Amino acid sequence: MELVNLKNSGDTASFAEAVKRGLGKNQGLYFPATIPTLGDVDELLDKPFVERSIAILRSIIGDELGDGLLEEIVQQAFTFPAPVETVTDRIYTLELFHGPTLAFKDFGGRFMAQCLSRISAGEPVTILTATSGDTGAAVARAFHGIENINVVILFPKGKISPLQEKLFSTLGDNVHTVAVEGDFDICQSLVKTAFDDPDVREGLHLNSANSINISRLLAQVCYYFEAVSQIPAEKREQLVVSVPSGNFGNLTAGMIAKAMGLPIKRFIAATNLNDTVPRYLKTGEWEPNATVATMSNAMDVSQPNNWPRIEALIEQGYIDKSCLRGESVDEEYTQLAMRQLAHHGYTSEPHAAIAFRAVSHDLNEGEYGLFLGTAHPAKFRETVENVLGQPLSLPKPLQEVAGKESLAVTLPADYQALKAHMMELLK
């Protein structure tokens, strides 16, 4: 498999090299030089999830992970289901929160951890990543206890739910957490600066586990096939998929799946008030505003890192731009959507509710909608209870951390402070 840096076409990498580097030169994203078209997709959709995922990833990665290694990685990473539930007669939801940290990022996080632990062959690695919510927990849990790999997670102080924070800030050992006095975009900026600093990048053997890492992105392609496999065959050609979007890795993965031949008619990029992409799709002007804090905090991103990959899919002819629409949903309509879902007998949290709102108002006659449920409602317990006016029980993973003390260190939004902290912590 050859991957090309979207900012520097001369910077290429194999899958293993791209997984180890995370980012390319000039903070460029790695992207497949070619995206394969699958043969008999219907036959593939009839296979079990793990077996199908191995076939999909093999077609993209090739024989680079030979001798049964890819099979072993997938089998150890994808140990939980991704069920599709019926919400209305025309709308379904894909539940991606049945993994150990109750969020869709368990798929990418666990796949990356399994890949990197084998590819690095015992060499020391420092995972540096920023999170607006669920990435932190998925990455921390996936890498916790893996020898020779340290994890440093930055998150915006006070801007993620307490239970989200507890899932990754209470682990300790090789997992180190930093509460940054700023928003998520600042956290991302600090990560990028660290990758541009040779003292840190080379001295600590930096890698990133954000959705910018190609291994996480490719893992996410697999659950779109799993979703469509559960949709009645006669409805698949008219399927509209609504993706709650923050950093846009999830949507990128879905569009790669479509490029490979998965029968998805079109996509909706569903955002909260941080609406850079919906405005861009309407006006053609890329004009990020200051990030706004919302109840769907994992999507509080005004400069999504993965957007260049979507642009590449369109510019290289894999995806027609007409199959992507953007929809911004404000706080009032987010709450309304949560209540509407409850009326249908389905309890949801703000991110999925935004995707539901977007698709329920954008279906044409004869179309069917699928929105992604990216996190368990209990991860946003306070918000869900306040909006719906009813108590919500905690699943076991949250019960286990609810009473624990956060081990996070608070730092100002200053790169030198972060660098000093990391060099002292990991020397």
Image (cartoon, rainbow, N blue to C red):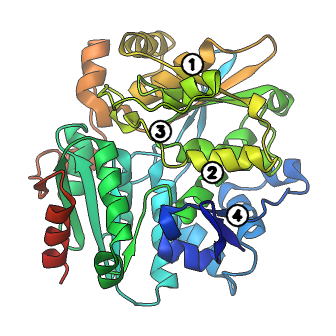
Q: CA distance from mark 4 to mark 3?
A: 25 Å
- State left or right for residue 418 relative to residue 370: left
Q: Residue tagged by mark 2?
A: 309
Front label number (3 vs 2): 2
- What residue type is disc 4 on? Pro
Q: Examine the rendering and report whether any part of residue 3 can be seen.
A: yes
Q: CA distance from mark 1 to mark 3?
A: 15 Å
Front label number (4 vs 1): 4
Question: Residue 329 placed where, x, y %?
Answer: 47, 18
Above or below for 6 versus 397: below
Q: CA distance from mark 4 to mark 2?
A: 10 Å
- What residue type is disc 3 on? Thr
- What residue type is disc 1 on? Ala
**Total numbered badges shown on the rendered structure:** 4
Proximity of marks 4 and 2: CB atoms separated by less than 8 Å: no
| Label 2 environment density (alpha carbons within 10 Å; few <14, some 14–19, many ≥20) | many
Q: Residue tagged by mark 1?
A: 358
Q: Quadrant of the C terminus?
A: bottom left
Q: Residue tagged by mark 4?
A: 32
Task: Find residue 374 and name its label.
Answer: 3
Residue reaching furthest bottom? 122
Q: Secondary structure at mark 2?
A: helix
Question: Residue 369 placed where, x, y %?
Answer: 68, 23
Q: Secondary structure at mark 1?
A: helix
Q: Secondary structure at mark 4?
A: strand
